[in-house]
C-alpha cells in the first residue's frame, strides 16, 4: 500500500504548493478540505495543516478538532494552522502591530530539534499573516524566532505536533525544503519511494485489476495529459483501448495528420475523425466567445458519441483529468463557479452510461510530464505548449470562417517554426497567434492595402494561474513579422501582446 501524507486545506493560496514540495521529495500526498476529512488508514504517515485567508479570531474561521490527529499522527501546522493550535490550546493570538508579510530571518533556532536539523541560524523564511501568536500554553516550546516574531516555530512537548508561522513551501524560504524533508523523513518516517517509475508500476497494475477485459474509449487531443493517460491505459489493456482523435478544423496547421501519425507510431489503437465541416458549419456567424465554446463542446460530444458507438461493448470512458481539476471540484469553497466544458469530456450525456477511468487524477502537470518521459513518450508531445480545447476558435476574435482559419494557421505555423528554430520555443510556456477583428491600411509594392492584423502572444508561466509576457528578442520579432506579412496573403500588420496575467488572460477570448 502506498504511504501518504494528508494535507488539510483551510483555503490557503499556497496549499497546492505544499503538495508539490512534498511530492518533489518523493512522498505521495493528498489534499482534502478541512471540513471533508478522508478515511485515515494505516497508510497515513502524517498530517499537514495549511494556512488560510481567515484570522483565527473571526467567528466564521475554519474549525477542526485537531485532537483527532494530535498524538496519533505527526502534525505540522503552517501559519493559520499554527495559530489555530495555539489559540485552541489556551494560548493567545492577537493582531500584529505591523503586518508580517515578506522575508524574515530566524535569529534563534533550536539546532538540536529534529524539525530544524541542518537549518542554519539566520535562515531566510517567508511570512504572510496579519495575526501573531502572543502567548503559548505551558506545554508548548518555542523552537525558532525572528527578531519580530517570538513564536516563529513551536513544538507541543511530548508529541510530534509542530507549528510554524512561516511558509516553508515557497522558494523565498531558503531552507523550507529541508524543513519539510525533516518532517517527512525523520519525524513521519516516510520512505521517499514515490517516483514516476513506482507510479507507473502501481497504476498499470490497478488499471488491469479495475478494467479486466473490458473496453475503454478515450478522446485524444494531441496534448500531454490525454497522451500520457492513453499510454498508461494501453500498457494495461492493449487493444481494448480505443482512442478517438477528432479534427474539429480548429487545430494548428497539419496538426491532425502529424499527431495522428505520432500516435500510430506509439502503437496506440487510434481512429481519426475528420469533422472539420461539421464544426465550422455550426460556428458560422457566431461571435460570442462563450457561445463558441458551447457549440464546440456540444458538437465534440456528438462526434465522439457517434464514434464511440461504433465500438462494440464499451464499458469505460478514459479521461486525462489531472489533480488540480480534482482539487478545484472539491475545494474548501465548494466546486468552482465555472469549469469550462472543453477542458475534458466530462459533459458526455447520461445515455452513454460509461464508467469513468482517470489514470492521472492524482498528478500535477509537471508530474504528468515526468511520467510521460519514464514511459518513453516523444519529447515533441511532452514538450508541447498548452493549447486551448476550443483551439483556434478563441484565437479568431469575432466570427469564424474557413478563410480566417487558413490565414491564422499559416501565420501561427510561421510563428512556431521561428520560435523552435531560434531555441525560444522551450523557453516559452505558451505561444500562439491571434486573428484580430480589425483591418489596417498598408502599402505593398505600389499598392495600398486594407488587410488583417495578427497579434503574437508568448508568455512564461509555471501553471497558467499567473503569467508574464515573454521578452522575445527584437530581431526575432522582426523576422517573424516579415515572414508572416511576406508569406501569408491577407495579413499586412503584426503586433506583439505585452500584457501579463493578471490583469489580462493568456488567451484573448
Image: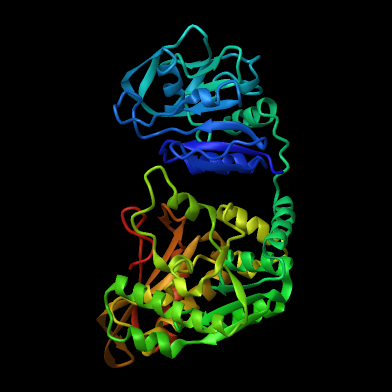
Residue 255 visible? The answer is no
Residue drawn at 35 percent across, 85 percent down: 282
Where is residue 48, by image quadrant? top right
Tell which of 409 and 301 is nearer to you: 301
Q: Position of residue 85 (x, y in %)?
A: 46, 21
Residue drawn at 44 percent across, 51 percent down: 328
Q: The C terminus is located in which quarter? A: bottom left
Q: Residue furthest bottom?
A: 446
Q: Position of residue 200 (x, y in %)?
A: 71, 56
Instruction: Tell whether 307 sits left or right of 402.
Output: right
Q: Position of residue 16 (x, y in %)?
A: 50, 44
Q: The N terminus is located in which quarter? A: top right
Residue drawn at 50 percent across, 41 percent down: 32
Residue 241 visible? The answer is yes
Colour logic: rainbow
Instruction: Tell whether 93 sits left or right of 136.
Output: left
Residue drawn at 34 percent across, 67 percent down: 508
Location of residue 179 with respect to 466 vertically, above or below:
above
Tell which of 40 and 412 is nearer to you: 40
Location of residue 271 with respect to 170 vertically, above or below:
below
Tell which of 433 and 509 is nearer to you: 509
Amino acid at each position: 500500500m502506498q504511504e501518504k501524507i494528508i494535507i488539510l486545506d483551510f483555503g490557503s493560496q499556497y496549499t497546492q504548493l505544499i503538495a508539490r514540495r512534498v511530492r518533489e521529495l518523493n512522498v505521495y500526498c493528498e489534499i482534502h478540505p478541512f471540513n471533508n476529512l478522508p478515511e485515515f488508514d494505516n497508510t497515513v504517515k502524517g498530517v499537514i495543516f495549511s494556512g488560510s485567508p481567515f484570522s483565527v479570531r473571526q467567528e466564521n474561521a475554519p474549525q477542526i478538532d485537531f485532537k483527532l490527529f494530535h498524538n496519533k499522527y505527526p502534525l505540522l501546522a503552517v501559519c493559520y494552522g499554527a495559530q489555530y493550535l495555539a489559540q485552541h490550546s489556551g494560548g493567545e493570538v492577537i493582531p500584529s502591530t505591523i503586518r508580517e508579510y515578506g522575508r524574515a530571518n530566524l535569529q534563534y533556532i533550536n539546532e538540536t530539534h529534529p524539525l530544524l536539523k541542518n537549518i542554519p541560524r539566520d535562515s531566510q523564511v517567508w511570512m504572510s499573516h496579519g495575526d501573531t501568536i502572543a502567548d503559548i500554553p505551558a506545554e508548548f516550546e518555542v523552537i525558532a524566532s525572528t527578531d519580530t516574531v517570538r513564536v516563529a516555530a513551536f513544538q507541543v512537548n511530548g508529541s510530534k505536533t509542530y507549528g510554524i508561522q512561516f511558509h516553508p513551501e515557497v522558494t523565498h524560504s531558503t531552507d523550507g525544503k529541508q524543513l519539510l524533508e525533516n518532517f517527512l523523513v525523520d519525524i513521519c518516517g516516510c520512505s521517499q519511494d514515490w517516483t514516476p517509475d513506482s507510479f507507473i508500476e502501481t497504476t498499470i497494475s490497478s488499471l488491469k485489476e479495475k478494467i479486466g477485459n473490458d473496453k475503454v474509449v478515450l478522446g485524444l487531443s494531441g496534448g500531454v495529459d490525454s497522451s500520457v493517460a492513453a499510454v498508461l491505459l494501453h500498457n494495461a489493456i492493449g487493444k481494448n483501448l480505443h482512442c478517438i482523435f477528432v479534427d474539429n478544423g480548429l487545430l494548428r496547421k497539419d496538426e491532425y495528420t502529424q499527431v495522428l501519425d505520432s500516435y500510430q507510431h506509439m502503437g496506440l489503437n487510434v481512429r481519426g475523425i475528420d469533422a472539420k465541416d461539421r464544426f465550422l458549419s455550426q460556428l458560422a456567424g457566431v461571435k460570442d466567445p462563450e457561445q463558441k465554446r458551447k457549440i464546440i463542446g456540444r458538437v465534440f460530444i456528438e462526434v465522439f458519441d457517434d464514434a464511440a458507438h461504433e465500438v462494440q461493448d464499451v464499458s469505460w470512458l478514459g479521461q486525462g483529468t489531472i489533480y488540480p481539476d480534482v482539487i478545484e471540484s472539491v475545494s474548501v469553497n465548494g466546486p468552482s463557479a465555472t469549469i469550462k466544458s472543453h477542458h475534458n469530456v466530462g459533459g458526455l450525456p447520461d445515455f452513454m452510461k460509461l464508467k469513468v477511468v482517470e489514470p492521472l487524477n492524482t498528478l500535477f502537470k509537471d508530474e504528468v510530464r515526468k511520467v510521460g518521459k519514464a514511459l518513453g513518450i516523444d519529447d515533441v508531445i511532452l514538450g508541447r505548449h498548452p493549447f486551448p480545447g476550443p483551439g483556434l476558435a478563441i484565437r479568431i476574435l469575432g466570427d469564424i470562417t474557413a478563410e480566417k482559419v487558413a490565414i491564422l494557421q499559416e501565420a501561427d505555423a510561421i510563428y512556431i517554426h521561428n520560435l523552435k528554430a531560434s531555441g525560444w520555443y522551450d523557453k516559452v510556456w505558451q505561444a500562439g497567434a491571434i486573428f484580430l477583428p480589425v483591418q489596417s491600411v498598408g502599402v505593398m509594392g505600389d499598392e495600398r492595402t486594407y488587410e488583417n492584423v495578427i497579434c503574437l502572444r508568448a508568455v512564461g508561466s509555471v501553471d497558467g494561474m499567473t503569467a508574464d509576457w515573454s521578452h522575445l528578442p527584437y530581431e526575432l520579432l522582426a523576422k517573424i513579422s516579415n515572414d508572416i506579412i511576406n508569406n501569408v496573403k491577407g495579413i499586412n500588420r503584426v503586433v506583439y501582446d505585452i500584457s501579463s496575467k493578471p490583469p489580462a488572460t493568456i488567451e484573448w477570448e
